[in-house]
Image (cartoon, rainbow, N blue to C red):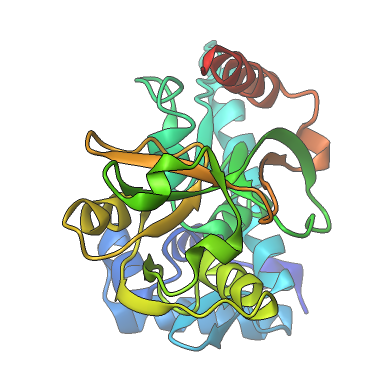
Amino acid sequence: MELGRLSADALASFAVFADHLNFTRAAEALHISQPALHVKVQRLAETLGHPLYLRQGRRLVLTPEGEAVARFARDLDARVTAFLAEIHGRSPARTPTLAAGEGAYLYLLGDVVRPGIHLVNGDRAHTLTAVRTRRADLGVAVLDVLPAGIDAVLLASYPQTLVMPEDHPLAALSSLTLADLAGSALVVPPPAGPHRIALERALRAAEIPWTLAVEAEGWPLLLHFVSLGIGLAVVNGCVTPPPGLVQREITDLPAVPYYALHLPDRADDPLVTDLLSEIRTTLRRRP
């Protein structure tokens, strides 16, 4: 490979593709055609001698080499920006970027979301990719296994709870076990989601019979269906139910840990440390 064949334009385009992991949306953001972007990414991969993404089911994911290329592209852009600012006698503007999922933003990080912080919204995999590729300075996600190559700082752990109408018979109990859910119709996430997988595994291991009320994506929609009386839902304890619903801890389900995630070389970066300190302060204020 000749390093001179690495195109700055192709690197910048790939960084945008890494943000979206969708050729159509990335091409729209770059104001070029989808085939043109595909050619840029393909030629970059051929130059480097490694595939930069692969398909998992219906979604695209970056390979380790793809993550490294996106990270390099963003580092290069940051260095050019800093250099130009220095040439013009200005201090480079640095705005913190936070990546997290819908549930974390709604129920955990609400007081942190403000003007002056760039936000990236996506599921756990998307959040990890945003941190690994330097798109985000800090990510927040629930983790079952700590990822390699990323520093994970425990923020808080919450019990898993059952949400139900306040007049439901189980609402009279102060806490529940999985056995109390026997025969319940449950509102659950789609099958591929980590919460659904873990819940089904626990119910199956405890030999608890249950029925599917409806599948729904995201805590707000789950709670909406519970409010309509369609079924009950198991949610993380940080989720605040709307009026008319109550939640009770399920004592034999494991607690759900939320972690702050950043690259090891960013441990002393003020963009990371200040944002992490703000999140910790916010969580200490929670009831």
Query: In the figure, 23 relative to 169: above or below?
Result: below
Query: In the figure, 203 relative to 125: above or below?
Result: below
Quadrant housing residue 253: bottom right
> Residue 196 versus residue 75: which sits nearer the camera?
196
- Residue 110 lies, in percent from the top left, at 40, 27
Q: Which residue is drawn at 66% across and 84% down?
A: 51
Q: In this view, does 2 lie to the left or right of 35?
A: right
Q: Is residue 111 left or right of residue 237?
A: left
Q: For the N terminus, which image quadrant? A: bottom right
- Residue 57 lies, in percent from the top left, at 49, 89
Q: Which residue is drawn at 61% across and 15% down?
A: 284
Q: Residue at x 38, y 35 (%)?
A: 240
Q: Can residue 72 be seen in this view?
A: no
Quadrant housing residue 128: bottom right
Q: In this view, does 150 lie to the left or right of 170?
A: right
Q: Residue at x 59, y 41 (%)?
A: 140
Considering every residue shown, the one lying at the far left of the view is 228
